[in-house]
């Protein structure tokens, strides 16, 4: 909490109060358009407050695109959308240099025309529909917050989030995301079907003349401030140790990992998984009205942070086990220590 000690308690208290106010207003506004999906909304908001990227996996028609568009509207950020297709080129994402002629002296100069990546929230729709060459154009942007075109480096606006969607059922004409790219996503959030009552509400809301819209409740500068605030949340050494242990046991090579991990897992979570799990737990603690991270925060976010970071082997496939099954077994196998 070294940064926090340099701030006056009143200033810090005011910033936390504003964080809570904005957070509840975002939820209120999004709820006007989106029905259900509490867990998904919480995870996308944590990603925004941490400054991480989010991969949203869901079946067609589960309002993935609508959710992202609504959140961008609520945050008052510049929203850009790219529909990923097999013929999309890297320059379609980053932008390109064009030759322009000066009408006064006839001189020709290179001018950079920005691509859709130069926004605050980038919706990468159906990201697994484009070849690896184009997917890699996002890699640098997601990690370094800049992009390189013809040797020139251009900084991206701050804040910058990639919210990518992918469809889990159609394998025809899709390109699985490379592990290096998957690892850069804070969460892999799964959108499931709604309950019957929620589906009724959606039908009632969307088949009338009135269209629901969300109002803007914050701005880019404030979100950057919230990201700093989240990093100030203290985490106890024992909770940090628990995070590191929980990530390490997903690796079959670790001496402490359980037998089922050694049997089913080829590769486990990276160091980045532990970093992201701590940051996400800090944001969740603040969103839940607490000033410190608990084991419960870590356990609640364990599966969405790690489900896309572990690679299973053919034994898991033959026993019809998915990443979530393994991670649930780890949570049962290693309960949280007593607070």
Image (cartoon, grey):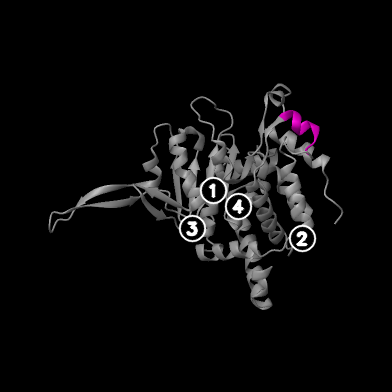
As measured in the structure, the alpha-carbon distance from the residue carrying label 4 to the one carrying label 2 is 22 Å
Q: Residue at x 57, y 40 (%)?
A: 182
Task: Look at the image and say whether residue 239 sits in the magenta stretch.
Answer: no
In front: label 2 or label 3: 2
- Magenta span: predominant SS is helix
In front: label 4 or label 1: 4
Crowding near the residue tagged with mark 2, few <14, some 14–19, many ≥20 C-alpha atoms within 10 Å = few
Q: Residue furthest left?
A: 105
- Element marked by disc 1: helix
Q: Which mark is residue 77?
A: 3
Which residue matches tag 2? 236
State the image coordinates of residue 333 (x, y, percent, origin top left).
83, 40
Q: Of residues 46 and 41, which is closer to you in this image? A: 46
Q: Earlier in the sequence, mark 2 or mark 1?
A: 1
Observer able to see residue 43 = yes
As measured in the structure, the alpha-carbon distance from the residue carrying label 2 to the one carrying label 1 is 33 Å
Q: Which residues are magenta?
A: 257-264
State the image coordinates of residue 119 (x, y, percent, origin top left).
44, 53
Q: Establish if 89 lies above or below 210.
A: above
Which residue matches tag 1? 68
State the image coordinates of residue 72 (x, y, percent, origin top left).
52, 54
Quarter of the picture containing the N terminus is bottom right
- Kindly indicate the quadrant of the structure image that contains residue 291: bottom right
In front: label 4 or label 2: 2
Which residue matches tag 4? 47
């Amino acid at each position: 909490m070294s940064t926090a000690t340099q701030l006056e308690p009143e200033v810090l208290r005011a910033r936390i109060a504003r964080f809570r106010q904005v957070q509840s207003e975002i939820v209120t506004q999004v709820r006007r358009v989106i029905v259900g999906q509490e867990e998904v909304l919480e995870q996308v908001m944590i990603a925004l407050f941490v400054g991480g990227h989010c991969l949203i996996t869901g079946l067609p028609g589960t309002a993935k695109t609508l959710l992202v568009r609504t959140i961008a509207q609520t945050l008052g950020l510049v929203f850009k959308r790219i529909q990923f297709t097999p013929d999309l080129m890297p320059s379609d994402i980053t932008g390109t240099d064009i030759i322009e002629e000066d009408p006064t002296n006839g001189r020709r100069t290179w001018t950079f025309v920005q691509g859709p990546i130069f926004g605050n929230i980038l919706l990468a729709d159906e990201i697994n529909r484009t070849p690896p060459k184009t997917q890699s154009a996002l890699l640098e942007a997601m990690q370094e917050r800049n992009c390189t075109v013809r040797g020139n480096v251009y900084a991206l606006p701050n804040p910058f989030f990639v919210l990518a969607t992918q469809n889990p059922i159609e394998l025809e004409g899709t390109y699985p995301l490379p592990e290096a790219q998957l690892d850069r996503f804070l969460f892999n959030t799964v959108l499931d079907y709604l309950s019957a009552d929620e589906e009724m509400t959606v039908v009632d809301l969307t088949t009338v003349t009135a269209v629901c819209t969300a109002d803007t409740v914050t701005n880019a500068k404030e979100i950057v401030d919230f990201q700093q605030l989240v990093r100030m949340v203290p985490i106890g050494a024992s909770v940090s140790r628990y995070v590191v242990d929980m990530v390490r046991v997903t690796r079959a090579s670790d001496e402490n990992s359980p037998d089922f991990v050694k049997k089913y897992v080829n590769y486990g979570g990276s160091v980045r998984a532990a970093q992201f799990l701590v940051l996400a737990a800090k944001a969740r603690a603040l969103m839940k009205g607490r000033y410190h991270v608990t084991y419960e925060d870590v356990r609640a976010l364990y599966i969405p942070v790690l489900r896309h970071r572990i690679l299973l082997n053919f034994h898991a496939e033959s026993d019809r086990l998915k990443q979530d099954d393994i991670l649930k077994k780890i949570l049962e196998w290693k309960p949280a220590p007593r607070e």
